[in-house]
Amino acid sequence: TSPFAPRHLMSIADLTPAELSTLVRNAASHKNAVKSGHVPASLQGSLFGKTVALTFSKRSTRTRVSTEGAVALMGGHPMFLGKDDIQLGVNESLYDTSVVISSMVSCIVARVNGHDDVANLAKHSSVPVINALSDLYHPLQTIADFLTIHEAFPSSQTSNVQGLGLEGMKIAWVGDANNVLFDLAIGAMKLGVDISVATPKGYEIPATMRQIIQDAAKTSPKAGSLIETTVPEEAVKNADILVTDTWISMGQEAEKIARLKAFEGFQITPELAKRGGAKEGWQFMHCLPRHPEEVSDEVFYSPKSLVFQEAENRLWAAISALEAFVVNKGKIV
Ligand code: CP
Ligand code: NVA
């Protein structure tokens, strides 16, 4: 790579613990400023005259709305390119597409199927590429998730400015071992948060990913730990936050019947939290879109649920990431 090679955001694994904390803190501070009526001077017009391409091979509500909105707030032009809009995948190679698009825009935000697609896009792009979900990672979601946790646990806000003050907290993930979990677990390791993962037998974290998560722990002086089980009750024990995601990710539709059967007993309910012994003040998170089998309405629409705040936080996470990777050229300060 040349000294001018852009810095990309493929996964939370690309960030140091301090950089992840900074992205979350910047997101929080921009959120507070904009909501109290003033757009920080550092953001105003910061993407003026620049185009950000949003190339999406899969559906999206939150990622599309948040990234388009973020570019607009920063004075740039978001150019949405859905899979039926461009030649990619039908009539043109990923290499050609990457070289051509990156020659005309300032950033590519890409939602892909296999992670190799976004990695190859980045490899050949002359501008920063931000992964907007691949089958392995969803970094923008993780930044929004730690912003949500930071807001929901005010004790973390008084802590040292270096980290996020979340050390010692426990997340319980009950559900599928998927892209959203992988980046969340990597982030947890870096921020000193313990994560306990319950998946059905046969749906565990793949060995290569387990290694990547454990390697993330080595990047942090105060690392979190990863615990795995096939028993949901075990995972929720002493947890501060219960999290899940869809059991059937985009692209897995053909496995629907088998998956619904395999995940029986994994629905997050007040009874599960009680049986397992989650902490009294436990909160619930879900990246959305949500289906009732994963979490009962009783939890999803309860005061314990952070889901809509978490969804809104995607906007502030997108602003923070665009500021770091595009405006500040990969310098996260
Ligand atoms: N959470 C999330 O990424 O949602 P979308 O698929 O709607 O973007
Ligand atoms: N795991 C889900 C997340 C959607 C935001 C998927 O990949 O479809």
Image (tube, helix red, strand yellow):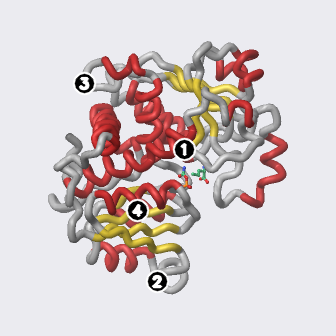
At horizontal 75% and vertical 35% (from top left) the residue drawn is 296
Q: Nearer the viewer, mark 3 or mark 4?
A: 4
Which residue is tagged 4? 68
Which residue is tagged 2? 92
In percent of width and height, residue 180 lies at: 54, 44
Local secondary structure at mark 4: helix
Local secondary structure at mark 1: helix
**Residue 244 shown left or right of residue 322 in the figure:** right
Local secondary structure at mark 3: loop
Q: Is mark 1 within 8 Å of ligand 2?
A: yes
- Disc marking residue 79: none
**Whole-Å distance between the Cαs marked 3 and 1?**
27 Å
**Rendered view: 160 above or below 248:** above
- Where residue 195 sits, quadrant-wise, is top right
Q: Nearer the viewer, residue 299 or 198?
A: 299
User: Quadrant of the image for the N terminus?
Assistant: bottom left
In percent of width and height, residue 65 lies at: 47, 59
Which residue is tagged 3? 161
In percent of width and height, residue 32 lies at: 32, 38
Pointer 2 or 1: first along the chain: 2
In percent of width and height, residue 33 lies at: 28, 41
Q: Amino acid at mark 1?
A: Val
- Where residue 4 sits, quadrant-wise, is bottom left
Pointer 2 or 4: first along the chain: 4
Local secondary structure at mark 2: loop
Q: Amino acid at mark 2?
A: Glu
